[in-house]
Amino acid sequence: MHDPIKHPPNLLPVNKPSLFGQDAGGVVGNIDIEFGYPQPQQNLAYKQYFDLVSAYPYQSYLVFRGTGGEKSNEGGLIGGIINALSVSDRDAFYFGNSNYMKEMLLWVKRTRVRNDGQGQWYEVRGDGAVVCEIGSYYIKTLIDHSRMVGNGVMLETRISDNETEIFTEYNDGSDWRLENVDKYVIVDHKTNHAGGIWVENNPVGYVGSTSASANVNFEIDCNFLVEVTFNIDGTNYSPKITHSRADILSFEVEEFADGDSSYKIVFLALKDFSFNVIVDPHRVNDTTIFSNHLYPFYVRVFYPRSEITETIELDSPDINPIHKIREILTDDIAMAKPEIDVNDANFIKAANRIWDEGLGISWAIDEKSCIDAIEELCYHIEAGIRVNRQTGLYEMVLFRDDWLTDEEIHTIAENKIKDLSLEVMNSDDIVNQLNVTYYDRKRIKNSTFSVYENGSILTIGKANAESIDFPYFMNMRNAEIVANWKLKQYSTPAWKGTLTTGWREARKWNRYDLVKINWSKKWQGTILARIMKIDLGNGLNNEVMIDFEEVVPYSGEMNTSIVVDDSTEEKAEPAMPAIGETFEAPYYIAVQNIGQRKIDEELAHNPDVGFTFSTYRRPQWNALYAEVLTSDVDKPENGWVVEGNAEFVTSGQFDQLVSRTATQIPVKNLQIEDYLNPNDLIVVGTWLSGEFGSYEFMIVESFDAETSILTVKRGALDTIPRGWDNGMYFFRSNPDDGLFSLTEYSADQNVRESTLTVTPSSKLEQLGSAPVYMRSRLSRPYPPANVKINDVYYPETIITTNDIVLTWLGRNRLANQIIDFYDASNDAELNTTYSYELISENVVLGSASGITGNTATILSSALIPNKPHTLRLWSVRDGYYSYQVFEHSFFVESASLILTATTDGSSVTGNTVPTSNISVNVDESLSANMKFDGSSISGKAEAGATITIEIEE
């Protein structure tokens, strides 16, 4: 770690007096950048004004101060012009000609220091590359196949004394370390040692001839030169040589003055090359280098010096995602795993590979589960993390063709598979287009492009698109690379399935291992599959169940094309209207903002006092905030008053019709400003529908991002559940969201509001205003909850002969809790009574007030058959009605005559509706107007008549 005493705060001078325009002014002053060291010192400029200024460990902050003359620690803090005639003489930091600090965009990076202040794990590797940081630029070297190999890099291996030493250098003699050899060029260079010691004219330790061999492999096809050189003692003889894929260009013997010779063989090799040289024992007389040593071999490999490079410029360094994953695993405030539980060799291999590929990420996370965070990072780099069941250590697996060697790939014979179920991935609709979203750091916005698999589109005759997001990639280059990988997975039909085996060896396998599967019923030979899940059984059944997916090679070429979104040189987008509302704040939100005692004191002085609350959705990517203004319609001369700036909140739309009892709601067009957490408040509806508006507060229980299902509780605070249309907007409305204005209003004021979106380059012009209904909301009791009609929520019909039994529960405004409609527990506020009225065709059929209990009965005699009715129920306390009223409409149906009768030969008994009176006499003649068809009797009679039925057996 840096020593803060030796490293004073970094000073950032700013001199942009016209940054906001000629009239608005700009920014002038010095900014002290204080980094969060373990033992920080107080900022001296800040301490001049606040002697007890805190200096918390690991907390970084900025101190804005004036230019303050020549001494770096002088100068006032933020403020206006102090004893100044010109901008350069200001003692205070200057933020333009306004009363508030403009919003700033700060790019904050932490790449070389961990969250707990330690230096980063595996910060620098042997070649000097800062592996934890995908740097300010990334260069990928391409091989120039046309270059002569002899003008390239030399890798030298010396063999003597039974040991192999590896030296690397340019052929012009300049130093070149082995770690710098590009991985795209050389993979393996191994020379088996050969030789011994010559003692008193005799070789020691060897009898007969010995050999040296080497294997050189390149990942790409290219020509390269191999020189094999060994010293001889003056005897000119030809060694025995075997080799593969090479042409021997020359034999050369170089004579030395002392009688020794150097024997050199030069090969022109191809992609991979191996050779073996056998020589007889002999002595080397060169006393300066190889005195009394046998068989010193030199192996030099020359490959083309790179001429073609691809350079990607990045604005600022990103962190290596492997380092971030490891930090999440081991950080005390994350998963807190001991560092010894991490396979460092494996993580180093993964970090090197990701650094070579240049796939750096940047993120800013407020709250996220550790597992979700790791899975998102793995998604960005096509990788997985696992705990190796043999070692118990965490490991990274990069989904690359060459990540695992042939020796690490498992094989299972067909006769060891007890059961196998299969299906073809992407068999129905092959995805051949990906719409990719990433964050463009230069444009400070989300940007998009599309990747197409042209061959597939031509084959099936249409494009099938999917959308993927890379929020942690800051440039198109990274998003394009991984998007092409994913497109190949999506556009290639491949097998996936589950196999069951009792083979003991399978119990040793791990998730993400590769296995070759033979299944002659479906394919010839084997397929290569990746293990996605392993179930080892339950102790009673020890069969292993493995879920797998066939591997689609990454390295295969694709016929793809890319279509990019609008040019980065686009014009600034003008400010657009924000969607949302400004409304009178309910009691709970007001209390959470300024305290219950303060609110109650205000209400005691003025029961009709009210405050406004604003909640708005970001209308465009570059919108900074919404400026909320209000005016008194009765006093237009006072003009518009700026209430403040409303920060944009998380919002979305309902994706279907929502009934009053629905609790699981599909949503769409979700715009995340902050996550939807359990117990968050959201508000739905509009305040422009009637005096008290048509809206509802809901309580978030959970949000499933995968299915876009929002689970809520209904009718919270002082609202009632309502039905909502598809497309209705909802806004997160916690007390600390949006804008709570401290301006006091009374119920008799006619207030209007206007909302102006502000962007870095513009502000929305004054729009038409909307009414804000101030209706003494803070004083009004909560409406009744859990209202039922004849023990049913919202019945559609009621029989005219039935009484209406109305029940409900009370809610207490002063409890200062978020209580929903259906879970209320009958905690009514003191002195609260209830009132109802029953209406049909604008006629009040029945009503009551002053009810102190939780039930009321409306007699059936008040109902009108075959007519619609509306029942309204509300709370009353101290002359204030509840802010919303429970209201439900239903249809009253007439009762139909229902007779169910049986006879025993002498009498008839049966049932009908309670108010009917039917008598049946036996042994009397059949009355007129009755018909008998052999199985039933039907007929008509005048009202009040007695029907007589004679039964004959």
Image (tube, rainbow, N blue to C red):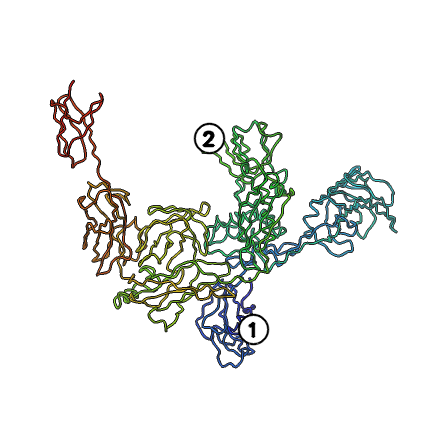
Give percent across and percent down for residue 904. Answer: 15, 22
Question: What residue is shown at x 56% (from left), y 59% (from top)?
Answer: 443
Q: Nearer the viewer, mark 2 or mark 1?
A: 1
Q: Residues within 10 Å of mark 2 (few under 14, many from 20)?
A: few
Circle 1: element type = strand
Indicate whether 472 appears above or below 31: above
Q: Viewer-proximal residue, 402 or 749?
A: 749
Amino acid, disc 2? Asn
Q: Residues within 10 Å of mark 1 (few under 14, many from 20)?
A: some
Q: Which mark is residue 46?
A: none
Dot 2 or dot 1: first in sequence order is 1
Question: What residue is shown at x 71% (from left), y 43% (from top)?
Answer: 217
Q: For mark 2, what is the residue? A: 541
Q: Viewer-proximal residue, 347 or 840?
A: 840
Q: Viewer-proximal residue, 667 or 638?
A: 638
Give the quadrant of the N terminus: bottom right
Give percent across and percent down for residue 352. Answer: 62, 50
Q: Is residue 713 left or right of residue 494?
A: left
**What distance separates the C-alpha of mark 2 from that of mark 1?**
75 Å
Give the quadrant of the C terminus: top left
Give percent across and percent down for residue 830. Answer: 22, 58
Q: Viewer-proximal residue, 479 or 770?
A: 770
Circle 2: element type = loop
Q: Do labels 2 and 1 touch, CB within 8 Å?
A: no
Indicate whether 722 appears above or below 600: above
Give percent across and percent down for residue 772. Answer: 35, 63
Q: For mark 1, what is the residue? A: 15
Indicate whether 874 appears above or below 797: below
Amino acid, disc 1? Asn
Q: State which quadrant residue 529 falls in.
A: top right
